[in-house]
Image: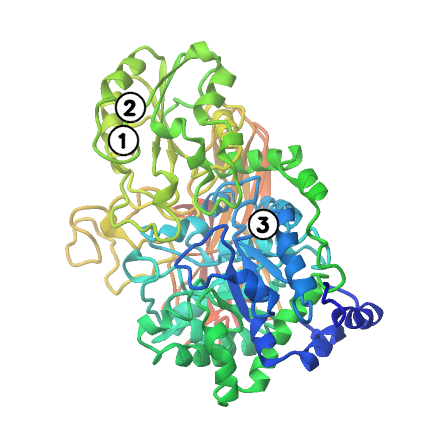
Amino acid sequence: MKKSFLIFPLLMIFLSSCNSGKSAQNSNRYPIVDSLLKVMTLEEKVGQLVLFTSDWGVTGPTMREGYEKDIREGKCGNIFNAYTAEYTRKLQEMAVNESRLGIPLLFGYDVIHGFRTIFPINLGMAASWNIDAIEESARIAAREAAAAGLHWTFSPMCDICVDPRWGRISEGAGEDPYLGSLISAAMTKGYQGEDLSDPFTLAACVKHFAAYGAPHGGRDYNTVDMSERWLREFYLPPYKAAIDAGAVTVMASFNEYDGTPATANHFLLTEVLRDEWGFEGFVVSDYTGIKEMIAHGNVDGPEDATVKAINAGNDMDMQSAFYYEYLVDAVKKGLVSKKTLNQAVRKVLTLKAQLGLFEDPFRYCSEERQAAETMTEYNLEAARKMAEESAILLKNDGVLPIAKGSKVAVIGELAVRADDMLGTWRGAGESDKMESILDAIKEYNGASNVIYAKGCGTEGQDRSGFAAAIVAALRAEKVIMVIGENCHSTGEAACRAYIDVPGVQTELLEKIAALGKPVAVVLMSGRPLVLERESAAANAIMEVWYPGTMGGKAVTNLLFGEANPSGRLPVTFPRALGQVPIYYYAKNTGRPFVNPTAKYESRYLDVPNEPLYAFGEGLSYTTFEYGDISLSAEEFGPKGELVASITVTNTGKRDGIETVQMYIRDLVGSVTRPVKQLKGFERVSLQAGESKTVDFTITPETLSFWRKDMSYGPESGDFNVFIGHSSNDVKSAKFTYNE
């Protein structure tokens, strides 16, 4: 028997008096929200703040079974790790037809870098520096996921990270807050589109708020400790950019900040997020995050955790079941006000209204649409292009590109493991529908011209395949070695104390290189690795990250010159583990390293200070030359601006794309300032021999920072502007700003 009789009168009110739109969480536009709040029991209200995983998959300990019974009883209003049009319809029918009020479920999933069509990992996409293409990747992911019954994605991940030991660096945009901000905003817009009532969109969830990417020791879930100034200037901007782009939900992070877990951090969740930034959506904990406050030592048991979390501004409990078990009694005891509870419930119901779920709870449950939207030719082509643009040519002694028809040896386990190309958090990607790197090379170059040998695995000490690999190399004109980390070595709970290429892969590379054959390394990883030995041994190194569904084709196109590499590093590659954390926008000390022969300067005795590969680096199959910087003026003030121009010429024989980067240095500040900060870039397509002039506009906002008194704005003084190929390869000029 259907029990939707209460909901339909409310729907009539809803349909006659409001419309859906992009505007975040203005429940006055949705009378059904007020109507429901008037008739909901305390238990039903709490149920809207409960998020349980289905039995399709988990990302941590399961705290609650029997979620289907909870749905029928109105005690669970949200489900994650459930997808397909058929399965979500089944669960939605339970909620709409069998619960007392028939409130539809909200379905969430980790749609991180694609759903069925998997794009390169997020760090890889960041390496493209192609903001429009990144936005389109999110739009494609949203269409595929929404067609499979999903409403909500736990993305974008906005965590800045300067420590490659942290496994989840693979999920973010790298080390830079400016680049990270552009990417987080683009992904938010891609997911949400212009109107959340469009059933081809997903609600975005900004995560992990905040500073999750800065754990001590690069160890996941670990303590974070930093000043508020550093937090605001280098870690918060990408989150805020996503909020400004319209993101309707936020996920609290696992870590603590200033002695309080983010899950119940009033400063982060209320003072900054809501009061300063004006966020009106809801906050959800991370997986069992509320329960984990007990282990942090910040709460006295489950009820205390529940009370502190919701009173701090954490609206929804993911998987802990603490709200489920303790929130009703906490409200009855007066530990949580009815106002606080109603505010949280209102936010959740408002999002469901925005998504059009009260109008049609099954609008996302079409199997026909699911088939039509999944892995289309357009989606696959976009994924291939992104994989090509994400790859970074780190070194090339002229070995690449390889001429078609050359006799090549392909060596390495990763060359045949298509599954690894999907990377971590691969949505609903399916490796059995993919082409491996080896298969793609054979298809392009002719199977008779390709010799394969495994050589060794990605882990362990097994050298039994070395001899066969050496024989294969001796029979070939050129060698392609596909080495790196398997996909399980990065991502959540996949931190590494050592960031060398694992196992005996490098040892095999050195033995192959000793044969005198030209060797090109295809590097597959989810983080920067220490590559001094590999760089010394190989003639060419191309970082392809985990390139996704179309990775085999993309890597082949790059190796054989059908595509010209254009990626640039979004994160620094150290030359030694001891340099970590290492990032380009570090500050000078009182004894900066200037003189190589001086001892009492900030330096290492055993390695240079400089990284192996700097932020912004990346080669091409052509070359580019920069002219000098031209300034429109030598100084400007609060109501003015300055234009910095530079001419770039393609001096090679191939067309190519150059990412022109602009950095700023504030020479004297009320607080110490970084040696460089990225403040602009432009991807310029240049034909062979072509020149273009690139203009960057510098405004007071460009020069703004968190000053001594913690106000935000520029200060008068002299500045350097740097424009060039990377953070360590630039031209410079000086200008003055006067307040």
Residue drawn at (57%, 37%) of the image: 383
Residue drawn at (64%, 60%) of the image: 94
Q: Nearer the viewer, residue 293 or 581?
A: 293
Q: Nearer the viewer, residue 513 or 653?
A: 513
In the drawing, what numbered circle is on residue 535? none
Residues at marks 3 and 1, CA–CA distance in whole angstroms = 38 Å
Where does label 1 land, which residue?
Answer: 505
Whichever of labels 3 and 1 marks the residue nearer the N terminus, that label is 3
**Dot 1: within a 10 Å radius of its alpha carbon, few (fewer than 14), some, or many (20 or more) residues?**
many
In the drawing, what numbered circle is on residue 83? 3
User: In the displayed structure, does residue 399 sit left or right of residue 405?
Assistant: left
Q: Which element type, helix, strand or loop, lies under badge 1?
A: helix
Where is residue 700 shown, x and y percent of the image? 55, 67
* Residue 25 picture quarter: bottom right
Number of numbered labels in the structure image: 3
In the drawing, what numbered circle is on residue 455? 2
Q: Amino acid at mark 2?
A: Gly
Which color scheme does this rendered protein use?
rainbow
Depth-wise, is mark 3 or mark 1 nearer the camera?
A: 3
Q: Nearer the viewer, residue 466 or 591?
A: 466
Q: Amino acid at mark 3?
A: Tyr
Q: Amino acid at mark 1?
A: Gln
Residue found farthest to the bottom: 334
Residues at marks 2 and 3, CA–CA distance in whole angstroms = 39 Å
Whichever of labels 2 and 3 marks the residue nearer the N terminus, that label is 3
User: In the displayed structure, does residue 658 sit left or right of residue 320?
Assistant: right
Where is residue 178 shown, x and y percent of the image? 50, 57
Residue drawn at (52%, 50%) of the image: 112
Residues at marks 1 and 2, CA–CA distance in whole angstroms = 8 Å
Q: Which element type, helix, strand or loop, lies under badge 2?
A: loop
**Dot 2: within a 10 Å radius of its alpha carbon, few (fewer than 14), some, or many (20 or more) residues?**
many
